[in-house]
Image (cartoon, rainbow, N blue to C red):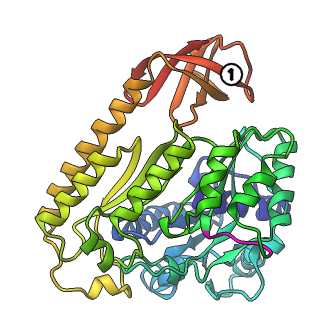
Amino acid sequence: MNVYDSARMADVLAPLGFDQSDRPDEADLVILNTCHIREKAAEKVFSELGRLRRIKEARAAIGKRMLLAVAGCVAQAEGEEVLRRAPFVDIVLGPQTYHRLPEMVARASRGTGAVLDTEFPAEPKFDFLPEARAEGRSAFLAIQEGCDRFCSYCVVPYTRGAEYSRPAEAVLAEARALAAQGVREITLLGQNVNGWHGEPGEDLATLLTALARIDGLERLRYMTSHPRDLGESLIAAHRDLPQLMPFLHLPIQSGSDRILRAMNRGHDRDDYRRLADQLRAARPDLALSSDFIVGFPGETEADFQDTLDLIAEIGFVQTYSFKYSPRPGTPAAALPDQIPEKVKEARLAEVQALLHRQTEAFSQACVGREMAVLLDRPGRYEGQLLGRSPYMQPVHVRNPGGQIGDVVRLRITAVHPNSLEAIPA
C-alpha cells in the first residue's frame, strides 16, 4: 500500500512540475512515506530524518531550499512528536490526506511554518486523485483502506481509519486506464482487501470477475486478506477465473488458538485449516503465503510449538515473520507477560529457518515444471529478460520467444538464491 501511495503522491505533484529524483541531495522536496506497524520501522524514520537534515542544511548553505515531508502512518500516529523531535520538517501528512499535498507544498514554500495535516477527511481522497500512471507491466490498485477488525497488536485501525471500499466503477475505470497503458497484471490492495464491498450483491469475487473481462489484463492478485472475510464466493473465484493467480497471501499470525484469541483475530487454527483445504480443492495448484508474529505477550513454549506444527502441516511458499513489537495505544501493549527479547529472537530464528526450508523446497519442486511467466523488464545480459512466475518468484530467461509485456510458457531449469532460471517451453 505504501508503494501505491508513494506513486500517487508523485502523480498529484506532477502538475506542479515535480519529477522523481534518485538523489536526495538534488531534490527540492523529499517525502518519507512511513510505516508504523512495528517499532523498528518507526524508529528508522527519525534516523533517516537526521541524515536528511544534514542534506537540507548543505543545500541551504549554497542557496538551495529543500522541503522535507513525513507522510504515512508514523505521521498519522505521531505527527506532533515528529515536529517536536525534528522541527526542521516542513510537512507532516497522514495517509488519507495526500490528495491535498500540492496545497501543503504551496503553504510550506511560503515559509510561514510547518504544515501538519493528519485529519481524516470527510471526502475520500480517491475522488481527487489524477489518473494513475503505469510504470511497468504490473501495477498496484488500491480498492479498500482501513480496518474494522481491531486485532489487539495492530495500529492500522488507528492510523488508516475505518474500512472504506472504493466504488466498483471507480476501480474498473482505473484498471482500464492502466491496461490501456500496457499493464498486464494488477494487484488489488487493501488493509483488509477481501472485506471490499460495493453495491448490494457486490463483493471481491464479483469485482474480480468484472476485472477479468478487461482487455489486456492477463493476471489478477489481491492482498492483504483476513481469514474471517474469505467466503465461498471468493474461493469459487479462484476456481473459475484463470486470470486470478494461484497464489494467496492469507495471514494467520499464530498457530496457537489461545494466542489467536488474545490477538482478537476472530478465527482459530481449524478455521484456517478448512480455508486452506477449500482453496486447494478449488484450485489444486494454489500456494499460500502468510504472516507470523512470534513472542506475543504470554506466548508459552507450547503456544510456539503450535505455530511450528501448523506451519509444518499447511506448508507455505513465502512468508513474513516478525518479533512482536508493542505499539502505543494498542491493547496488547498493556498485556502482562511481555516476552523477553532474547526469547523472541530465538523463536524468530527457529520459525524463519522452518519457513525458509519450505520456500526452498517449493522452489526446488518447480524445477522441470512449465509455468506462464510475465516478462516485465530486461536482464543483465544480452537476450535475457526477467519476469514473475504465478507464485511471485523472479524468473530469468535467455531468448524467451517473447518481449516485455508478454506472458510466455517457460520450463524451470534451476534454482538460484533469489530467483529461478528457465528456458522456453
Picture quadrant of residue 161: bottom right
Q: Is residue 290 above or below residue 181?
A: below
Q: Secondary structure at mark 1?
A: strand
Dominant secondary-structure state across the stretch colored magenta: loop
Q: Position of residue 165 (x, y in %)?
A: 71, 73
Instruction: Specify the segment rendered in magenta.
Output: 195-199
Task: Report whether 246 appears left or right of 220.
Answer: left
Crowding around mark 1 (Cα neighbors within 10 Å: few <14, some 14 to 19, many 20+) is some
Q: Is residue 304 above or below residue 383?
A: below
Instruction: Judge whether residue 88 can be spotted in this image.
Output: no
198 within the magenta span: yes
Q: Position of residue 80 (x, y in %)?
A: 50, 88
82 or 207, nearer to the observer: 207
Q: Position of residue 284 (x, y in %)?
A: 52, 38
148 or 101, nearer to the observer: 148
**Residue labelled with disc 1:** 408
197 within the magenta span: yes
Task: Report whether 185 appears left or right of 226.
Answer: right
Q: Position of residue 185 (x, y in %)?
A: 70, 42
Picture quadrant of residue 182: top right
Task: Report whether 389 appears left or right of 78.
Answer: right
Amino acid type for the residue under numbered disc 1: Val
Task: Report whether 126 appears left or right of 411.
Answer: right
192 or 286, nearer to the observer: 286
Residue at screen point 49% across, 79% down = 149
User: In which quadrant of the rendered image does the N terminus lie?
Assistant: bottom right
